Image (cartoon, grey):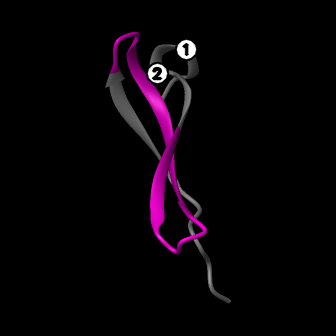
């Protein structure tokens, strides 16, 4: 059975401080793949 990864979680330095960010790609209607990001919260709040 094949397994597929939907995205990844990284720590980015932002103005509020180090932040967990979820990164994923989508395919647009014209066939191009583009990256999107969603902020999950501060590292100190959520923890490693």
Which residue: 57% across, 64% down? Answer: 28
Residue 31 vs 48, above or below: the answer is below
Marks 1 and 2 in Cβ contact (< 8 Å)? yes
Place of residue 42 in the rendered image (x, y in percent of width and height, measured from the top left)? 49, 18
Which residue: 53% across, 56% down? Answer: 7
**Structural distance between the alpha carbons of marks 1 and 2:** 5 Å
Q: Nearer the viewer, residue 46 or 33?
A: 33
Which residue: 38% across, 33% down? Answer: 11
What are the residue bounds of the magenta stretch? 14-37
Magenta stretch holds residue 3: no
Residue ranking furthest to the right: 1
Q: Secondary structure at mark 2?
A: helix
Quadrant containing the N terminus in the rendered view? bottom right
Q: Nearer the viewer, residue 38 or 44?
A: 38
Place of residue 21 in the rendered image (x, y in percent of width and height, measured from the top left)? 48, 35
Task: Identify residue for label 1.
Answer: 45
Task: Identify residue for label 2.
Answer: 43
Q: Is residue 21 left or right of residue 6?
A: left
Total tally of numbered discs in the picture:
2
Q: Quadrant of the rendered structure where residue 2 is?
A: bottom right
């Amino acid at each position: 059975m094949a397994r597929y990864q939907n995205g990844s979680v990284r720590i980015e330095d932002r103005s509020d401080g180090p932040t967990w960010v979820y990164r994923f790609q989508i395919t647009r209607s014209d066939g191009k793949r583009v990256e999107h990001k969603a902020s999950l919260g501060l590292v100190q709040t959520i923890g490693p």
